[in-house]
């Protein structure tokens, strides 16, 4: 459904490149229909060599004739982008913003467009295992929603939410989520090293345990407590470890941490509007 569409990326950094790679590698779009716009010319040239996409250093020229314009710059660079594109895109252009914390209303006002999709992706998108949570204005039609699903599907899983306020929750849970998981992984590896494993072996044991636990939880979609009980024999080693984790307040700390990220996301969003 994207084959006939023209897609322009404003910003072709980490996330822009992950999206371009996903779209081309899944054969969702012809490379000649994609333009990567970025101030770094050599970056565009490399993307052209690697994926065959067009490139530009001129955002306005790159967006002319685009059906979908993807905003993929860092939040601090968005204002000049909105200023230069404002009023220059036809009303039917679909804008897809992955810029963290910037409300739809601000993008809509500056670009003078109604058709806006806002997405919260996460880092595992770089390996096709991302979790993207997205919402859209009422002006985004059914066909455009299907196009968005196809684009985000190339990055991993996507979930549509009816209201923009869910994006702050998604930011706290799955946008920042990989950082919590990496901290957990790091701490477990350090614990392995503390006991006497070499670091590479500890790392492999932990990564495979985390990956296997996720696969197991997907294969047996019971309540996590039931899965945990399967590993916990009465009076055994796991029970001792879990006792220490509960005593240390792991559950409450995680909840507080996620809630703090949620509050921060809301505060940043309201200062942006
Ligand atoms: N990375 C993540 O895991 C993640 C997760 C969720 C959401 N996001 C969101 O995704 C967006 C992009 O993040 P990223 O990690 O991909 O950032 P990034 O790697 O810094 O990529 C942004 C690119 O945009 C370029 N750029 C700067 N000003 C521009 C302009 N005026 N016109 C066109 N391009 C411009 C940058 O060039 P220079 O290097 O020269 O500045 C850079 O190549 C951010 O808004 C972030 O909030 C990222």
Image (cartoon, rainbow, N blue to C red):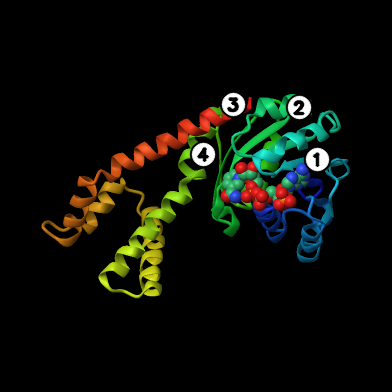
Residue drawn where x is 20% and y is 58% of the image? 238
Residue 257 badge? none
User: The C terminus appears in which quarter of the rendering?
Assistant: top right
| Residue 189 left/right relative to 83 | left
Q: Residue at x 82, y 57 (%)?
A: 41
Q: Nearer the viewer, mark 3 or mark 2?
A: 3
In primary-sequence order, the first of circles 4 and 1 is 1
- Which tag, 3 or 2, sits closer to the chain's start? 2
Q: Can you identify the residue that label 2 sits on? A: 110
- Dot 4 corresponds to which residue? 171
Of residues 149 and 170, the one nearer the viewer is 170
Q: Is residue 266 placed above or below 71 in the rendered structure?
A: above
Mark 1 residue's CB less than 8 Å from ligand 1 = no
> Residue at point 49% right, 33% down?
264
Q: Residue at x 39, y 59 (%)?
A: 185
State which mark lies toward you, 2 or 1.
Answer: 2
Whether residues under marks 3 and 2 lie with C-beta atoms below 8 angstroms apart, the answer is no
Q: Which mark is residue 271?
A: 3
Residue 197 placement: quadrant:
bottom left
Give the residue pinned by disc 1: 67
Q: Sequence-wise, which precedes: disc 4 or disc 2?
A: 2
Residue 156 place in picture, x, y as percent: 57, 52
């Amino acid at each position: 459904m994207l084959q006939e569409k023209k897609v322009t990326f404003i910003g072709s950094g980490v996330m822009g490149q992950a999206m371009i790679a996903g779209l081309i590698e899944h054969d969702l779009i012809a490379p000649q229909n994609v333009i990567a716009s970025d101030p770094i010319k050599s970056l565009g040239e490399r993307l052209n060599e690697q994926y065959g996409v067009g490139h530009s250093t001129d955002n306005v020229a790159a967006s002319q004739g685009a059906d979908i314009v993807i905003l993929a710059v860092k939040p601090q660079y968005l204002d000049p982008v909105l200023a230069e594109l404002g009023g220059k895109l036809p009303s039917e252009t679909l804008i897809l913003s992955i810029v963290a914390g910037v409300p739809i209303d601000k993008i809509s006002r500056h670009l003078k467009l109604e058709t806006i999709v806002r997405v919260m992706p996460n880092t595992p998108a770089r390996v096709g295992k991302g979790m993207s949570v997205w919402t859209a204005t009422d002006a985004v039609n059914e066909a455009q929603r299907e196009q968005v699903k196809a684009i985000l599907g190339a990055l991993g899983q996507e979930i549509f939410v009816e209201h923009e306020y869910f994006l702050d929750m998604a930011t706290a849970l799955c946008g920042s989520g990989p950082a919590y998981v990496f901290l957990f992984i790091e701490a477990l590896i350090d614990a392995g090293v503390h006991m006497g494993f070499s670091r590479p072996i500890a790392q492999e044991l932990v990564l495979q345990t985390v990956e296997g636990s996720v696969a197991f939880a997907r294969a047996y979609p019971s309540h996590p407590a039931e899965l945990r009980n399967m590993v916990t024999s009465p009076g055994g080693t796991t029970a001792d470890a879990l006792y220490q984790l509960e005593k240390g307040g792991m559950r409450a700390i995680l909840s507080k941490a996620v809630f703090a990220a949620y509050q921060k996301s809301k505060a940043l969003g309201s200062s942006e509007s």
